Image (cartoon, rainbow, N blue to C red):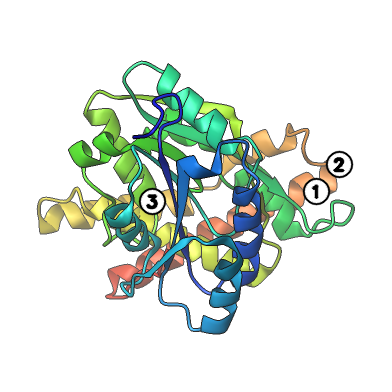
Amino acid sequence: MEDPDYPFVSVIIPVFNDGERLKLCLAALAQQSYGRSHYEIIVVDNGSDRLEEMKAAVEPYGVVTTVEPIPGSYAARNKGISLAKGEIIAFTDADCIPAADWLAQGIDYLRSTPNCGQVIGKVNVFFADPQRPTLVELYESVTAFPQAQLLRQFHGGATANVFTWRQVIEQVGEFNPQLKSYGDLEWGQRIYAQGYNQVYAESVLVRHPARASFQEFYTRTRRLAGGYYDLKLKKAQSVWQRQIIFLHTLLQHLTPPVFFTINTLLDARLNGMGQKLKVSLMMVLARYISAWETLRLKLGGVSNRG
């Protein structure tokens, strides 16, 4: 029987063709301050075709491995949940590097917060070369993983860094595998609707590399736009409502990002007016990419995998 002071935890990590960064994640998890006998790591391969790379990543760490062929990280997380033995479930991603006290801090917040349904931790975005960040990296540094804001506005957070109780999942249900993005926020909203407390914790920390290339920026923007549109359509009760949702979403994306630009000009994380203006222009571009993706989906396209 487990010591009640050290509840057993299941860490669930979906992965798709990302063996090299998964190695860093698993190395960090192997060095946790929380006792190794009190947690398991479940890696869910989501249909990778680099099998040797994936095998090399997990072999040194003795983790539980499984495969979920249905595309999408939420389907993969659900597969991990089905195998989990822990009273507590912790989620992170293959490209995240948890701090050494990540588990200890997350568990402490979960246990010390009354009626806690979800702990949402901080995701620190870092550059490949801090002295020479790319424009995409700068954009990521002010837009990626705004966990506190997501909790405040949407009652959820990115599953790059989330803790919950198994009993909460049993009550509110697993992730919606049909969503390619924003499924973590939809799941968080169900937790909120059941009356659970949700807390943001800066000391529950993982690091995440900023996306650096335009291709990565373009792919992520399309994925998020598709996930957002899919999530909105879930609420539609009729064909008429679907039309309204489409028009409203399209208008949102085509509206100039005035408030973002103002906040960017005041953002101390960016150096000089040049960086601030370039990041503002990146948001304009992201809006237009999102508008085009929404139109593509409206015309019968399928959203990209999460």
Q: Position of residue 71 (x, y in %)?
A: 35, 71
Q: Position of residue 18 (x, y in %)?
A: 57, 70
Query: Which residue occupies 12% across, 59% down?
Result: 239
Crowd around label 1: few <14 · some 14–19 · many ≥20 (10 Å): some
Up-down: is 301 above or below 123? below
Q: Position of residue 301 (x, y in %)?
A: 32, 75
Callout 1 amino acid: Gln
Q: Position of residue 98 (x, y in %)?
A: 62, 45
Up-down: is 66 above or below 207? below
Q: Which residue in the structure is indicated by mark 2?
A: 272
Specify which label sits upstream in the sequence, 3 or 2: 3
Of circles 3 and 1, the one toward us is 3
Residue closer to the observer: 19 or 1: 1
Disc 1 on helix, strand or loop? helix
Residue closer to the observer: 139 or 254: 139
Residue 190 seen in this snapshot: no
